[in-house]
Structure formats: structure tokens, C-alpha cells
Image (spheres, rainbow, N blue to C red):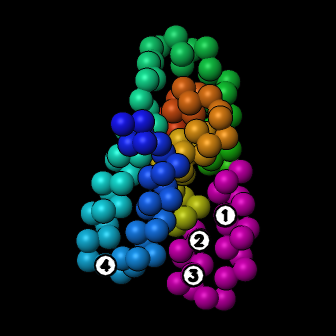
Amino acid sequence: MRVIFDVKLWTILGIILGFVIGFDHPDAPTMLIITLMMQMTLALQGLKFDFSDLKNNKKEVLLCFLCCFLLNTAITLITGLLFIDETALWYGWVMLSAVPCAISVMSMTFYMKGDMKLGMLGFSFIYLGA
């Protein structure tokens, strides 16, 4: 039963399925959504929140917000400048810079043995701000 909750196993399985099934499979978007829902559910297992958590981590949550919308956006746009001659690619980089980080925030917090509660608070605040 413990294997079912191993996020590393699901990540590796997802990568393998991506290569086997391919990314242009008609059901790929549906499978991706289901996988992301399962991964997020497993990542949040055992976390409990209340308003004091946000109050105690105000500075860190604000730092997450600033890093996402200032630092990450700047790095993405600077990288996209390499493709400015290709209009479609440039627009893709601009779109990428406007979107906050997704599920990978919680996965990387887990892999790096970070503070899951703070990761989720920052993640939630970023999405509420977006």
C-alpha cells in the first residue's frame, strides 16, 4: 500500500507513459489532468492549515509571490529573447512567463525535503494572486 503513495514512482511512471503513449495521443490532456490531480492529492496528504499559518509565514509567502512574478517572469522573458525572431516561439515564451508555476512546486518541495506547508501556502497565494 505504501508504494501507491510514492510520488517518485508516479513521476517515473508518468515519464515512461509519456514516451510510450506519446504526447499527441487524443486522451493525453485527460490523462495529464488525472495524473496532476492524483499527484497534488498525494502531495497534500497529512497537511493541516489554519489562519495562523499564513500569519506566521507572511514574509515567506510574499517572497514566493515576488520570486514567481518578478524573478521567474524576468528569467523566462530573458530566455525567450533568444527566440524573438521567431514570432510564434516568442509569443510562447511570453505566455509561459505570465503563468505561475504549477504542480511542480509541490513535487520539488517534496523531493528537496522542503517545508510542504510553506510550499502549499506560497503556491496557493500565487494562484490567488494570479
Residue linked to disc 4: 25
Dividing the picture into quadrants, the one containing residue 62 is top right
Residue linked to disc 3: 89
Q: How many marks?
A: 4
Dividing the picture into quadrants, the one containing residue 74 is bottom right
Distance in Å between CA atoms under marks 3 and 1 = 12 Å
Dividing the picture into quadrants, the one containing residue 98 is bottom right
Q: Residue at x 45, y 18 (%)?
A: 49
Circles 3, 2 touching at the beta carbon (< 8 Å):
yes
For the magenta stretch, what is the residue range?
A: 71-94
Residue linked to disc 1: 76
At numbered mark 4, what does the secondary structure look like: helix, strand or loop?
Answer: loop
Distance in Å between CA atoms under marks 4 and 1 = 28 Å
Q: Say few, some or many: other residues with alpha carbon within 10 Å of mark 3 (under 14 / 14 to 19 / 20 or more).
A: some
Circles 4, 1 touching at the beta carbon (< 8 Å):
no
Q: Nearer the viewer, residue 124 or 108?
A: 108
At label 3, which amino acid type do we have?
Leu
At numbered mark 1, what does the secondary structure look like: helix, strand or loop?
Answer: helix
Of the image marks 4 and 1, the number of the one nearer the N terminus: 4
Q: Residue at x 36, y 81 (%)?
A: 24
The quarter of the rendered structure image containing the N terminus is top left
Distance in Å between CA atoms under marks 1 and 2 = 7 Å
